[in-house]
């Protein structure tokens, strides 16, 4: 199981659309004093209009100003700058459809690249050696090239939780992790969103065991908040299954916790490990949870006598 980047960022953009636009496409974002409204385009509209060309995990928004001005913003999240994965032609068609759907020519395509080992493409041009007939451009945000130090004190929630995804100075991963956690706790008061984005921060930070120990030692308040969030997730995971049976809820909650622990420790899980988790008893899951911190490999977790 790998991180679902599309879904993670879709949630983030829908929860904080103004902050998302300010980070990913600042030149197109409303000024703080402007009373613009951000309206998600309903999925039913997209399905009816776009059919098979619609992708559930794209994030189209309509930005509306009090004077009636409208602007469509299409967010697309790409894990890396792989030309085989990112399709400018598909994005161009998508933006034309959004323009028709929202009855506006003011369309802003925004592509967020999480990792960019090479410069992403900047435009698409159709034509011949005699003339260019169509030129299409988009805002390309290379998240891993943004200096984390520039955003560590910001009140932009999207920027704060993405600090681990930015360019972090050598030796600064733990401090950035703490700044991301501290910023979220200060800026977001809703408990459910706090929990959701504490997990987001932790997932993308990918701290080593030594870094986690340093975090706990240097930043006890932030560490306590992070641990409390995970405990709440564990408790809620257990409670979620009560309607189908208390025991089933406990097993599902414990399985979710163990899976998150394994992903943070070892990265992507092979199919065999996922299958073992699905078929595990409560006793198995508790035993594996106890082993994760000390284990050197997945085999140490599952097969140690």
Image (cartoon, helix red, strand yellow):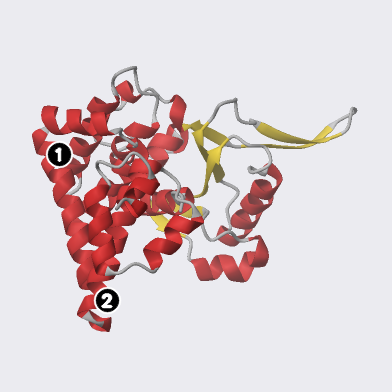
Label 1 sits on residue: 223
Residue 108 position (above or below residue 45): above
Give 26 or 63, whichever is nearer the viewer.
26
> Going by the image, does 274 lie left or right of 211?
right
What element does badge 1 sit on? helix
Q: Left or right: where does residue 219 sit relative to residue 55?
A: left
Q: Residue 177 location, x and y as percent?
A: 26, 32
Q: Is residue 29 visible?
A: yes
Task: Name the residue beneath numbered marker 2.
Answer: 248
Q: Residue at x 27, y 76 (%)?
A: 248
Place of residue 84 in the rendered image (x, y in percent of width and height, measured from the top left): 68, 41
Q: Position of residue 225 (x, y in %)?
A: 13, 44
Residue at coordinates 61% horizontally, 71% vertically from top-left? 48
One can see residue 17 in this view: no
Residue farthest along the bottom direction in this orientation: 244
Which element is circle 2 on? helix
Of callouts 2 and 1, which one flags the residue occurring earlier in the amino acid sequence?
1
Q: Counting other residues with Cα less than 10 Å from the Cα at mark 2, is it few (<14), some (14-19), or many (20 or more)?
A: some
At x 56% / y 43%, what residue is drawn?
109
């Amino acid at each position: 199981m790998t991180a679902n980047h599309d879904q993670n960022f879709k949630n983030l953009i829908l929860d904080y659309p103004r902050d998302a636009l300010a980070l990913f496409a600042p030149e197109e974002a409303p000024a703080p004093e402007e009373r613009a409204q951000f309206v998600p385009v309903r999925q039913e509209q997209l399905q009816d209009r776009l059919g098979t060309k619609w992708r559930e995990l794209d994030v189209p928004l309509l930005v509306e100003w009090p004077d009636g001005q409208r602007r469509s913003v299409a967010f697309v999240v790409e894990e890396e700058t792989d030309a085989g994965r990112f399709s400018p032609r598909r994005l161009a068609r998508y933006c034309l459809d959004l323009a028709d759907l929202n009855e506006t020519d003011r369309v802003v395509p925004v592509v967020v690249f999480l990792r960019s080992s090479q410069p992403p493409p900047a435009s698409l041009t159709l034509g011949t050696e005699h003339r260019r007939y169509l030129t299409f451009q988009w805002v390309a945000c290379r998240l891993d090239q943004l200096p984390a130090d520039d955003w560590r004190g910001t009140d932009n929630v999207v920027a704060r939780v993405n600090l681990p995804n930015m360019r972090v100075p050598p030796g600064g991963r733990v401090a950035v992790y703490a700044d991301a956690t501290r910023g979220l706790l200060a800026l977001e008061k809703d408990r459910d969103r706090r929990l959701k984005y504490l997990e987001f921060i932790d997932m993308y930070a990918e701290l080593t065991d030594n870094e986690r120990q340093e975090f706990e030692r240097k930043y006890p308040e932030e560490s306590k908040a992070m641990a409390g969030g995970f405990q709440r997730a564990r408790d809620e995971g257990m409670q979620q299954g009560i309607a189908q049976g208390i025991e089933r809820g406990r097993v599902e909650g414990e399985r979710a916790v163990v899976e998150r622990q394994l992903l943070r420790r070892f990265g992507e899980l092979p199919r065999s490990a996922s299958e073992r988790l699905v078929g595990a008893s409560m006793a198995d899951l508790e035993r594996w949870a106890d082993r994760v911190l000390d284990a050197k490999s997945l085999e140490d977790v599952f097969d140690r006598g």
